[in-house]
Image: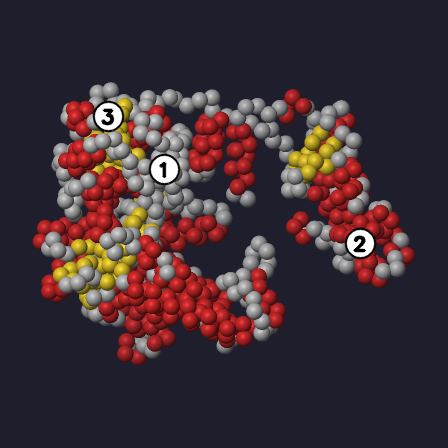
């Protein structure tokens, strides 16, 4: 239902005429128009994937069936349907159609319906003569379901007598309203459709190509007088082959910009020396999209590590992310489409192919460089304005104090990488391969046959048809058996053996392929693993990582923990793991001003045991393991808007019991209930919520009439303030710790961040001192009423550090 107004806006913007009539389906409008147009002498083509429209086909009316890619004439209808067009309604009435909720007549399929219609004609005639039918199932079906057969015919019959005037002139398709379409598609983030609009437009504004500098002397001469604000863009995403540069302080704007191709003799060193000088200049501001890659280029050009970044950084990608955190695409081309309504040139447009970039001096490189400068300057101007206006300036502070200073920190971590014991992973892979083979054998033995274990369809048949396990759920679309992890876990708790084997099999095969076998292939020439951290992906403000994604290594399973043994320190060094203890619960206690939670944290109590004791009204020492687990589940669940249904499912208890537990929790912790209510009120009034630092999460669906969308927005509102604040705290801790290490402990370095944990590599003899430094910096980020606590351990491997 919520899509209908958007569809109407799209049709109006395309200037496609709209005809509708209350209480009638679109098929009826189509049928009426088709009959009237044919009577007026027009040749009519109906375009649809609905087979019901075959009943309208006639001498002047044909059907282009988009699903079958056929143009139906009366002859083709009879050939495919087995009956002429005028009898299609009778055929469909007998067969039924579950997709259209047409019941049909039980026991009569397509072939039977074709035979009966050819012999008796209409449904009415067939009902009158049903006693003549020799086949018992047909006869009884018609006699017992007479009203259902007539209802089915009424449902599939298209009414062609609606009081709609046929005016061909009013049905003309005028040229689309490009501005209205662009606004709608940008709002809906349909960037490929925006791109189509640009491609179909009469032409885009021509941008001057970049001016190539071909030798070191020319480069130094052309950049000597460049202003304070410099726009820099790498040419080439995988491995930059050059640089495009614009002067944002030039009187006439950045103009076409300069560009250099590193493949020309001698120029690369000169350019990177200039770039390193700009990076180290406190009077400069480097502007660009994904400036971390520009800094990486300076670092690889010979600048000292860690890179001394004294220049200001304005990254349009990060600015865009802060003002529109829920938008998934902050790439250069996507931003140009969304903000500038401009289809930017891609590397492919500039001649990149599988063999590599175009040759030196190719004019397409000059065109690409010119665009990167001109469009980059416009994006910088627009996003800087948005950043200042959004959130009353709070987002500009988040950018200046958190996101921009974090860029060189992440770069240093990525470039340093972490040691990986590939031999250990190889042995682990061999061990798991043996266990996987044995698991497969046991699965087939219990199932009584071999089948494709990875096929949900085949697995469903084995579990629920052959073995007769209870069917817990079916998939929404195909109504086939659901065989997801939650189904297998529930069956496993009921004592069925096969689900236990399958869960173990899935865990082993996934971890083996995703990490154990994949990680060694990602190791660099230096023998270290260099992940990439993303700042502009998670809407909550959390960092993510790719190649590999370290955030998803399981931390609670024995196998996931064993993978951490592969992450090792260099000889003479140890890995140090510093982990925030229950940081989100501490933030909740602080924001909610909940005295019972705050006091429990201040006393250093087991917070989940203390919660259970408070909610259940008993002494903490009397709380059993099950009660503590329930309290832990609700402590974390409350931050994610967990419902009674969710708590019941998580704990395996009844819904009434879960509701009583939640009610008791909120009655005892009035501050938490007040936090929930105030957060939702703010979200509804302002359409957004903020972290303690001013990071914004917009919630467009908070007043949606769609219950599922509204409730999801409410959960996000309750969680966003907490998780977003935790993300800000972690980022600030990384910035503080990186600066402290650079100034006082140059032999130590940050390596990884995973959830609420930082991993460092430090000289073995300094481990204890570095643990104190990590705790000081991480716990000193912010003063909460429920104070931050950091747990620290160290050892030769990441596993040992966590164990310690």
User: Which of the 4 image quadrants contains residue 296?
Assistant: top left
Q: Name the residue under label 2.
A: 112
Q: Looking at the image, is 658 positioned above or below residue 695?
A: below
Identified at 17% across, 33% down, the residue is 270
Between discs 2 and 3, the one toward the N terminus? 2
Q: Position of residue 604 (x, y in %)?
A: 21, 69
- Residue 325 in sight from this viewpoint: yes
Q: Which of 311 and 613 is in front in this view?
A: 311
Q: Name the residue under label 3.
A: 213
Residue contact between numbered discs 3 and 1, judged by CB atoms under 8 Å? no
Q: Position of residue 650 (x, y in %)?
A: 42, 67
The outermost residue toward the right is 132
Q: Looking at the image, is 751 positioned above or below residue 661?
A: above
Q: Looking at the image, is 9 positioned above or below residue 398?
A: above
Q: Position of residue 212 (x, y in %)?
A: 27, 25
Q: Mark 1 points at which residue?
A: 356
Q: Distance between the residues labelled 2 and 3?
A: 79 Å
Specify the label residue 698 is tagged with: none
Identified at 21% across, 52% down, the residue is 416
């Amino acid at each position: 239902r919520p899509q209908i107004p958007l569809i109407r806006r799209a049709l109006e913007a395309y200037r496609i005429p709209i005809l509708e009539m209350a209480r009638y389906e679109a098929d009826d409008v189509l049928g009426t128009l088709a009959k009237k147009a044919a009577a007026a002498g027009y040749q009519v083509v109906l375009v649809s994937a609905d087979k019901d429209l075959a009943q309208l086909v006639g001498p002047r009316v044909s059907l282009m069936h988009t699903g079958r890619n056929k143009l139906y004439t009366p002859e083709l209808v009879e050939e495919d349907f087995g009956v002429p067009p005028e009898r299609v309604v009778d055929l469909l009435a007998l067969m039924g159609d579950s997709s259209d909720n047409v019941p049909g007549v039980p026991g009569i399929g397509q072939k039977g319906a074709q035979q009966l219609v050819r012999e008796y004609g209409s449904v009415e005639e067939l009902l009158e003569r049903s006693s003549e039918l020799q086949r018992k199932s047909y006869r009884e079906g018609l006699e017992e379901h007479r009203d259902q057969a007539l209802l089915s015919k009424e449902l599939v019959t298209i009414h062609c007598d609606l009081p709609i005037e046929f005016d061909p002139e009013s049905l003309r398709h005028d040229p689309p309203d490009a501005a209205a379409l662009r606004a709608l598609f940008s709002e809906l983030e349909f960037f490929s459709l925006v791109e189509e609009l640009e491609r179909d437009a009469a032409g885009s504004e021509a941008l001057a190509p970049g001016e190539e500098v071909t030798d070191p002397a020319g480069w130094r001469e052309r950049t000597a007088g460049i202003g304070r604000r410099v726009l820099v863009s790498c040419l080439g995403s995988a491995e930059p082959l050059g640089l495009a540069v614009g002067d944002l302080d030039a009187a006439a704007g950045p103009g076409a910009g300069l560009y250099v191709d590193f493949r020309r003799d001698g120029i690369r060193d000169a350019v990177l020396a200039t770039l390193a000088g700009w990076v180290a200049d406190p009077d400069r501001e480097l502007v660009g999209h994904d400036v971390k890659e520009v800094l990486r280029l300076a670092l690889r050009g010979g600048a000292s590590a860690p890179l001394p970044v004294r220049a200001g950084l304005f990254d349009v990608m990060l600015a865009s992310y802060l003002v529109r955190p829920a938008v998934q695409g902050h790439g250069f081309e996507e931003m140009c489409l969304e903000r500038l309504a401009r289809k930017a040139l891609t590397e492919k447009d500039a001649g990149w192919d599988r063999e590599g970039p175009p040759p030196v001096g190719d004019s397409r490189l000059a065109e690409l460089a010119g665009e990167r400068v001109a469009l980059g300057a416009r994006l910088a101007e627009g996003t800087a304005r948005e950043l200042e206006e959004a959130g009353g300036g709070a987002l500009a502070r988040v950018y200046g104090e958190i996101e921009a200073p974090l860029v060189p920190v992440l770069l240093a971590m990525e470039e340093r990488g972490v040691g990986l014991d590939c031999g250990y992973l190889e042995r682990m892979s061999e061990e798991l391969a043996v266990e996987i083979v044995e698991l497969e054998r046991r699965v087939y033995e219990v199932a009584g046959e071999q089948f494709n274990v990875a096929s949900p369809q085949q697995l469903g048949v084995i579990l629920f048809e052959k073995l007769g396990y209870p069917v817990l759920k079916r998939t929404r679309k195909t109504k086939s058996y659901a065989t997801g992890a939650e189904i297998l876990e529930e069956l496993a708790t009921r004592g069925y053996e096969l689900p236990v084997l399958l869960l173990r099999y899935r865990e082993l095969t996934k971890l083996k392929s995703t990490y154990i076998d994949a990680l060694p292939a990602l190791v660099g020439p230096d023998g270290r693993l260099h992940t990439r951290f993303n700042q502009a992906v998670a809407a909550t403000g959390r960092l993510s990582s790719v190649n590999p994604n370290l955030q998803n290594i399981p931390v609670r399973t024995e196998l996931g923990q064993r993978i951490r043994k592969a992450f090792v320190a260099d000889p003479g060094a140890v890995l140090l793991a510093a982990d925030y203890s229950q940081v989100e619960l501490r933030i909740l206690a602080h924001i909610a001003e909940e005295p019972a939670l705050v006091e429990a944290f201040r006393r250093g109590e087991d917070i989940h045991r203390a919660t259970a004791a408070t909610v259940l009204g008993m002494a903490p020492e009397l709380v059993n393991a099950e009660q503590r687990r329930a309290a832990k589940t609700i402590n974390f669940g409350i931050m994610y808007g967990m419902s009674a249904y969710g708590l019941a499912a998580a704990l395996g208890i009844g819904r009434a019991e879960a509701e009583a537990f939640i009610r008791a929790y909120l009655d005892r912790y009035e501050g938490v209930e007040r936090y929930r209510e105030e957060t939702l009120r703010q979200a509804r009034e302002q359409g957004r919520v903020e972290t303690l630092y001013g990071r914004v999460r917009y919630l467009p669906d908070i007043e949606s009439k769609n219950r599922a969308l509204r409730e999801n927005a409410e959960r996000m509102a309750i969680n966003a303030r907490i998780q977003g604040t935790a993300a800000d705290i972690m980022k600030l801790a990384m910035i503080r710790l990186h600066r402290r290490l650079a100034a006082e402990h140059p032999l130590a370095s940050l390596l990884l961040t995973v959830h609420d944990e930082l991993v460092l590599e430090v000289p073995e003899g300094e481990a204890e001192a570095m643990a104190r430094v990590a705790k000081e910096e991480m716990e000193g980020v912010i003063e909460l009423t429920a104070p931050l606590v950091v747990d620290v351990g160290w050892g030769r491997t990441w596993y040992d550090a966590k164990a310690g």
